[in-house]
């Protein structure tokens, strides 16, 4: 009986090697095409977040200050900078992927006794709204 034990291990090893060869590459290794699409969405998402960052800075510069109570207030909105993104396959030949971008829309309030104090005051976060944007990958590029 003990002499047959090593034979069983050899047979088992041979069967496993055959199964791995027939089944192809491991599913743990990502498809190079998907990796390329993932990389292109990462670049697209970073460019999108940079655009939102510029919008947020413009919102601060264009602060609309209004009289309130015994002073002044100004409100503005900024985005991110933190974000998460992922892609999903759709099964559609025309639009094979969608990209999901998650970030926060942050609402701020500035207060001061004068307009100048209001402009110079640090913004206080009043609301943090989660945002999910969906982009489609059509004809080889990401579209809003």
Image: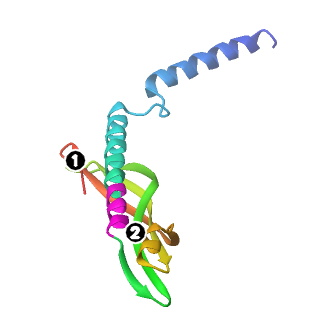
* Picture quadrant of residue 12: top right
Range drawn in magenta: 53-62
Give the camera-side residue of 74 and 117. 117
Q: Secondary structure at mark 1?
A: loop
x and y, in percent, of residue 102 in the image: 43, 58
Instruction: Work out whether residue 89 can be spotted.
Output: no
Outermost residue, right side? 2
Give the residue at x 34% y 50%. Answer: 50
Give the residue at x 45% y 88%. Answer: 68
Outermost residue, bottom side? 69
x and y, in percent, of residue 70 in the image: 50, 89
What coloring was used for the rendering? rainbow
Viewport quadrant of the N terminus: top right
Viewport quadrant of the C terminus: bottom left
Identify the residue under disc 1.
93
User: Which secondary structure type mostly characterizes the magenta part of the structure?
Assistant: helix
Instruction: Work out whether residue 93 can be spotted.
Output: yes
């Amino acid at each position: 009986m003990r002499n047959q034990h090593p034979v069983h291990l050899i047979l088992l090893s041979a069967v496993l090697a055959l199964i791995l060869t027939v089944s192809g590459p491991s599913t743990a290794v990502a498809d190079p095409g998907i990796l390329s699409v993932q990389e292109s969405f990462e670049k697209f998402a970073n460019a999108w977040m940079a655009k939102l960052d510029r919008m947020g800075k413009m919102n601060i510069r264009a602060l609309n200050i209004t009289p309130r109570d015994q002073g002044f207030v100004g409100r503005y909105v900024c985005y991110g900078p933190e974000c998460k993104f992922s892609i999903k396959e759709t099964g559609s030949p025309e639009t094979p992927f969608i990209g999901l971008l998650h970030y926060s829309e942050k609402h701020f309030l500035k207060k001061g006794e004068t307009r100048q104090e209001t402009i110079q005051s640090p913004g206080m976060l009043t609301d943090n709204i989660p945002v999910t944007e969906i982009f489609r990958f059509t004809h080889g590029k990401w579209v809003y």
